[in-house]
Each structure stands twice: as structure tokens, then as C-alpha cells.
Amino acid sequence: MAMEQTGRRKQKAPTIEGAASSSSSQGLVATEGKSPLLPKKQKRPVSRSLVPYLKGREVGARGHMELLGFQGELRRYALQKLPELLREHVLLLGTLNKVFASQWLNARQVVGTKCSTLFMMDVQSGHIMRILLMRDQEPELVRNQTSSGIHAIELNPSKTLLATGGENPKAVYQLPTLDPVCLGDLHGHKDWVLAIAWMSDTVAVSGSRDGTVALWRMDPNMFNGSIVWHNDTELPVYAHIRPRDMETNPRSSTNPSNRKVRALAFSGKNQELAAVSLDGYFHLWKARSTLSRLLSIRLPYCRENVCLTYCEELSLFAVGSQSHVSFLDPRQHQQNIWSLCSREGSTGVRSLSFYQHIITVGTGHGSLLFYDVRAQKFLEERASTSLDSSQEPAGRKLRLTCGRGWLNHDDLWVNYFGGMEEFPSALYTHCYNWPEMKLFVAGGPLLSGLHRNYAGLLS
């Protein structure tokens, strides 16, 4: 989306990151006239006292079952209380430009940025270690295109492999050493990879800007492979893999030229792969040794569909757009798509994650919102941060607003924006470390021309 600077001189302003966006603030509310997918569950009263739990231990196996139930209740209680207790600690990333993806590695963090830098940060000390990107040739198609940066970083289920997207079809590293394993073959995607999802420890799927989805299988024998140095360019040559299967998104009648795959999510329970594309469609494949398309649904809100997540417990997909979060259960008729409407203008929803029945929403306005799917309402602020369950909600949506981060004061910033500092950082990525009760958030400005980064640890 383009804008113009008004005044004595008119100049064309930079475009907005990731597709388009812009917004002004309030939050998300349920769309009128839409029926929720899930009925509200009646919850039995739960004692917060340790006395019933201690008595239960005296009766052997019955006590063990009560212990499991008590622990489950504690987890649900902590899930409700944690967001309002989080406090921000800003992390310094130097002059890197925008953070698009992140994953926890124990107490550390791996992040990818728009300037195609892969690095590992120790969130305790702030120490940053750069990771060598795997490159052994530069395809002509990529060389002539604008850099999209690293939009995807995903760990396999056992956390022994890490896959990244970007200009390479797919790069895979071994964990915890971060030794190079392999690159995706150039006979796969013809454009930048924007999304990755693991189906198992050795099978992954990637989605590209060229509108294709590819299934890759890693051979365990290549994990101990060696690097051969190229004689001419002195660049290392790595092991390569070819996709086992590739599928192309069907062309839509409304926007046939924009089939870019923007996000992927995998359902292990149903062995199904979901994708959202920038032409406003939700696609679903049966994913086994090959990909077999099951359906393609036109989303009710189809601008800026840039993020997707899945809840195994509820069998529910959630798609973020310029102004809504849409919930889909593929087992239901498509008319049952349920949406939340954003009042943050057009900055939209930039990142989503499920944990049990709570979905965390990262917005383009630099804030985090928390929605309880079962209760069908947002978590609300309380009068104080006390854990006392008798404390009544204040009636306002719980919104955590993040800091501004670092901004490069270059000529573009001076000429277009007159030195304005008030640019919120869109939260392009966030991820939880639940054992340590920490949340990593990161991003940068929506305007593509601005060089800026933000990262924070909420704990």
C-alpha cells in the first residue's frame, strides 16, 4: 500500500512490510452476527487450597489421579494469570533491520531479520552470535529480486534440526551445534521461501513467494556429511535435497497473480497441512508422502493474510489479516468461519500463537492481545497485579504495549517523516518459553523503507 506525503512537495512514501497495513488502536472484538464455533463449557468449581490435594495423596492411586487433575488446574490458572504479570525487558540488536521470525533454543533465541542475518542471542547476557548462512550459488531469479529476509525459522519436533527460509529454497542446520546439514535444491521453489512447517523429525514443508508448496525429506545419513570447497568462488558446496512433491496454489479469479504462500501450519492429529496465500485463500492438503489438496476456501477477510496458527486441542486454525482473526475448523461447513474484528486500523494482525485455548495476537501497532477461545472473550486487566483470584477484572482488554526499539536516522527518515520518532514496531514474531514463563517478541516498522528493529523479553 502506498501513501503520499502532503505539503509543498509530494513524494511517494515507502510501502508497508509483508503485504500492506496501517492502523490506529483499540483491539479486537467479536464480529456481529457470527456464531462462535465452540460452545462455552461449564467449569466445575476448583479449590485453590493445597488441603484437598494433600488429603488426596493419602489414598494411593486415587491421590495420584487427583494430583494430575490439580496440576492441570494449576496450568490453566497460570495460563490465565501469566499475561498480566509479564514485564518488558528491551533487548539490543544493534543496527539489524526488522525481525521476522524466532524460536527458542533452551534459554537462547534464534532470530532472522530482513537483512538476512541469522543469529543466536543469549537473552540473559545479551550476547549475540551470528550464524553463517549457507550459500553455494546465487540463482539468477533471486539475484534480481528485492531481499525479503528470513521470514521462517522452524525446529523439528525433537529439536535436533532447524530449518530456515529466505533466498535459498530451504537451509537445514543440526542442533545444538548449528552445523550445516543441507540446502533445498534449486529445482524446487523459484522464489523466496516465506513459510516452513515440520511434519516429522525428517519431513518438512515449505511455502514460497512463487505460489508453490514443497515437501522435503531429509536423509539421516547426510547429517554427518562433509563440505566440499568450490574451486572458482571459494564458496562451500553443501549437500542438496530435492522436493519429494510440489503443489501449486490454484489461481483465484479475483487476484490470479498473487498466490504467494505466506504462512503454513500442520495438524499432526489429522495429518493435514494448511496454508494461507495473499490472494485471500485458505488451502488444506492431506499430507503424507505426498500432498493431496482437500479444499480451498475464500476467507471472509482477505487482505494481508500474513500469519497462521493451529490448536491441536481444539482442532482449530486461526488466520490473521489486515483487520481480523478468522477461526476455521475444517470439519465444519465453511460458513461457520468465525472472526474477530480488529480496531487497530489497518496495521492488522502480524503474528499469532496458540497455547491450549489462549491465542496471543501480535499487532502492527506494537501491542499484544490475549483471547480465550473457550470463554469467547479477551483477557481483561485487573485492578492490581495480585494473583488473588477474588480480584475483579477492570473491564478493559489486557493489552501489553511494547517499546519502540532502535531506528536508523537516515535521509529517508528525515525527508519523508521530518524526524518523527512516533513509529510503533509491528510485532512480526513472538514465541513462548513456557517452562521458564518467558515470552520473546520482536519486529520493526511496517514501512519497508524505514530501517529499524525491536526485540524484547517479557517475563
Image (spheres, rainbow, N blue to C red):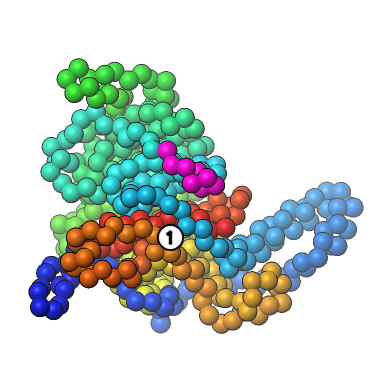
The structure residue drawn at horizontal position 39% and vertical position 60%, both measured from the top left corner, is 405
The structure residue drawn at horizontal position 29% and vertical position 63%, both measured from the top left corner, is 446
Check residue 80 for magenta coloring. Answer: no
**Is residue 296 visible to the viewer in this orientation of the structure?**
no
The structure residue drawn at horizontal position 32% and vertical position 74%, both measured from the top left corner, is 23
- In the rendered image, which quarter is residue 138 located in? top left
Q: Secondary structure at mark 1?
A: strand
**Magenta residues, as a range?**
122-129
The quadrant of the rendering that contains the N terminus is: bottom left
- In the rendered image, which quarter is residue 107 located in? top right
The structure residue drawn at horizontal position 29% and vertical position 18%, both measured from the top left corner, is 228
Question: Taking 56 as reference, is 222 above or below it?
Answer: above
**Is residue 87 visible to the viewer in this orientation of the structure?**
yes
Q: How many numbered circles are shown?
A: 1
Question: Taking 366 as reference, is 430 above or below it?
Answer: above
- The picture places residue 93, in percent across and down from the top left corner, at 40, 50
Q: Which residue is mark 1?
A: 352
* Residue lying farthest to the left in this orientation: 9
Of residues 223 and 329, the one drawn nearer to the viewer in this rendering: 223
